[in-house]
Image (tube, rainbow, N blue to C red):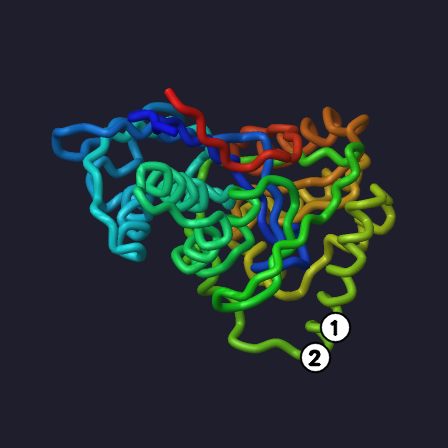
Amino acid sequence: MSKSNSISVKVPATTANIGPGFDCLGAAVSLYNEFEFSLTQEKTSFTVSGIEGEKISLTEDNLLYQSFLKFYAQTGQEIPSVKINIKVGVPLARGLGSSATAIVGGLLGANYFAPQPLSNRELMNLAIAIEGHPDNVIPAFMGNCILSVGEGENWNFVPVNCNPDIAFVLAIPDFELSTEEARAVLPASLSYGDAVFNIARLGLLIRALDTGNGHWLWQALDDKLHQPYRSGLIKGYEEVKQAVLRSGGYGMVISGAGPTLLALCSQSDSVEVSEAMKCAWQNVGIIPMVRSLFLDREGAKISEN
């Protein structure tokens, strides 16, 4: 079967950790980056459009193309010249997995054009190796909410059912927070008590997401591994959290490394929770974009142009 000379790869944003699931749990949500690859006889080139497009590198050092190159370095195949158009819909450095979309998009684009493509499992292992952990790249690749358990190249990717009544309300602020900065504030070690605290809540969270039990979610979204340390980097964190609870939300967490904040609530309360998050952040001088999103159940998709 002949392949097209031009494809588009659409990759969903992700919200990782979801409270206690640090570095192992993430969900794909209905916000997207799209990457167009076209084979060319000319030198590889880049164009970009969409939100914050001016922040995307248009040279070969951008993460999308570095992931594209990593595929060919890993497989020892010849690197094709391509024209790449990046359509940005996921804000950068906000805890929404923008880097994961670039990694997954680059690998899928490279894999499509390769004479000897890798399996999905091999691509996911390579994505984890590039990103360093699975919580964003795997749900971006597979869709849904995924618990990733393993190490090296031995992973189990476990779908976690999310009750359709649960709304994912994301408040995306007008400032960035790098993953490096967010990781730098984490302690080198933790107590057994804190470990047990998180183990219990991750188990409860998986059941709460499945059932939609609001009281369980309220307790399950708590965490002692990363949020107590990162919340201080996010102006207005406590004010927004209290606003979520007052407006009927089940709870609020930091999306990925932040600074985006994620509230979980029932679909019927999503408008009120959205407005409460927006107002609370505006009251401390932050202008957020608030979106009530759905779980993306398909993951990254390739279409031939």
Q: Residue 79 versus residue 17: which sits nearer the camera?
A: 79
Q: Residue 104 versus residue 180: which sits nearer the camera?
A: 104
Residue 208, placed above or below residue 264: below
Do labels 1 and 2 touch, CB within 8 Å? Answer: yes
Q: Which residue was labeled with disc 1? A: 196
Q: Position of residue 299 (x, y in %)?
A: 55, 37
Q: Residue 120 versus residue 130: which sits nearer the camera?
A: 120
Q: Residue furthest left?
A: 42
Q: Does 229 sit left or right of 201 as displayed?
A: left
Instruction: Examine the image and state in which quarter residue 48 appears.
Output: top left
Q: Position of residue 233 (x, y in %)?
A: 51, 53
The kind of secondary structure element at disc 2 is helix
Identified at 28% across, 42% down, the residue is 65
Q: Which quadrant is the C terminus positioned in?
A: top left
Instruction: Examine the image and state in which quarter residue 278 appears.
Output: top right
Q: Position of residue 205 (x, y in %)?
A: 76, 54
Q: Which quadrant is the N terminus positioned in?
A: top left
The dot on residue 192 is 2
Other-residue count near label 2 (Cα within 10 Å), few / some / many at <14 / 14–19 / ≥20: few
Identified at 35% across, 28% down, the residue is 2
Other-residue count near label 1 (Cα within 10 Å), few / some / many at <14 / 14–19 / ≥20: few
Q: Position of residue 66 (x, y in %)?
A: 28, 48
Identified at 45% across, 31% down, the residue is 302
Q: Residue 212 versus residue 245: which sits nearer the camera?
A: 212
Identified at 22% across, 35% down, the residue is 58
Mark 2: amino acid:
Tyr
The kind of secondary structure element at disc 1 is helix
Mark 1: amino acid:
Val
Q: Does 10 sit left or right of 157 as displayed?
A: left
Q: Residue furthest top?
A: 305
Find the distance from the CA under tag 1 to the CA under tag 2. Answer: 6 Å
Residue 144, placed above or below residue 293: below
